[in-house]
Image: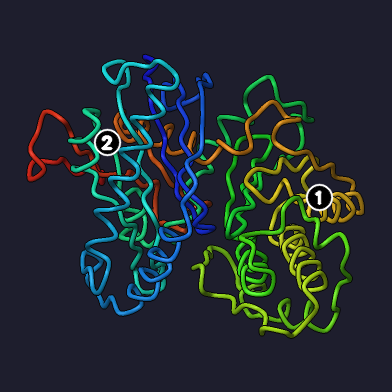
Amino acid sequence: MTLMRAIGLMSGTSMDGIDIALIETDGDAAVKFGPSGDYPYNEEQRILIEQGLHDATSIGDDRNDRPGSLTTLEHQLTLLHADAVHDFLERNQISADSVDVIGFHGQTVLHRPQQALTVQLGDGALLADKTGIDVVFDMRAADVAAGGQGAPLVPAYHRALAALPSLDWDRNSPVVFVNVGGISNITYISASGELIAFDTGPGNNLIDQWMHAEADVPYDLDGEAASRGVVDIDILKRYLAKPYFQKPLPKSLDRSDFEPLTPGELAVEDGARTLARLTAETINAAIAQLPEVPSKWVICGGGRKNGVIMQDLHDLATETGGSVVAAELAGFNGDATEAQAFAYLAVRSLVNLPLTFPGTTGCLKETFGGVLASTSESSSGKRMKFG
């Protein structure tokens, strides 16, 4: 198939900013990496998103409802994404005319798959108008409508990465990709290409909330605070006793599904250490729900920069004969992987390939997703791609 040039945009549950990446792909096996970048949110923007998360809790059955601040927030977030695209293109001397499509994830503000409800803020038609590039957006809704969890969405891209020769792994055994963002999710790829994926538990979210509340910093840089703390076993066991971890597949999480530590409950360093261990323990515990023990774990997302999480993952994987590597050591850009994935998924949507599968989200059958906002059409003429 013909290669298409695509930009991916991702704003995740950690709410730290917009990740952007360009790739060339046929939406199947061919992937060529281009430049990437990130555009952090400032404190005021983070506060507005947090207010949006609160307002989203009042959404009823209509996923298009925008109570409270959500209409304004959606508009502002879309303009921020448009500004990021313009700056990215200028910095990298790329013409907008040379880009075939933008994959626009938007900002998840509500995720209730048990109610067939998932809401990502992002006006695809406005983004297409502001950038002059076709946009595929709202990529989770079709899967939820088909009985799926709507997450994780990136496994198809992980499978394409696993097939690249840059990744050194025993092709006769399974490999796992882990994204440690606000929430951690895992993609299991068997030797035959079978996919299993699910959210494993908290990623950086609880750590970030703790550091913001107790130390007035947005996150634990490189796991420095955690490196000086000790694990509180009782609190760790309290989290690990949550029903989610025993829940059968398929399953996914909302950012609010795990309550933060109580302010002052622990010293700053001990809280950071305990939550880092929680992240690693819950990722490793995914083995119990996989057909085989993975031989290699490839860690993507911001959590791979936390040295304590990575050391814990290494120690735990070693016990089962596996090895853990950060994305860069596998030949990938761990900061850009999710943004790249949404560029890849946008192309899959355009060429009518499925985005999700029964083994990744629990959808009843392979599901095609995304909404196309074309620059050649009015916003009222945007074409649905739900298959």
The answer to whether 125 appears left or right of 19 in the picture is left
Residue at the location (7% across, 38% down)? 378
Which residue lies under the disc numbered 1? 307
Q: Position of residue 75 (x, y in %)?
A: 24, 53
> Mark 1: few, some, or many residues within 10 Å (few <14, many ≥20)?
some
Q: Position of residue 156 (x, y in %)?
A: 50, 38
Disc sitting over residue 209 in the figure:
none
Q: Position of residue 131 (x, y in %)?
A: 25, 31
Up-down: is 238 above or below 69?
A: below
Asked whether residue 349 appears in the rendered view, the answer is yes
Residue at the location (43% across, 38% down)? 342
The answer to whether 80 appears left or right of 30 in the picture is left
Contact between marks 2 and 1 (CB within 8 A): the answer is no
Question: What kind of residue is marked 2?
Answer: Val
Question: What kind of residue is marked 1?
Answer: Gly
Mark found first going from the N terminus, 2 or 1: 2
Where the C terminus falls, by quadrant? top left
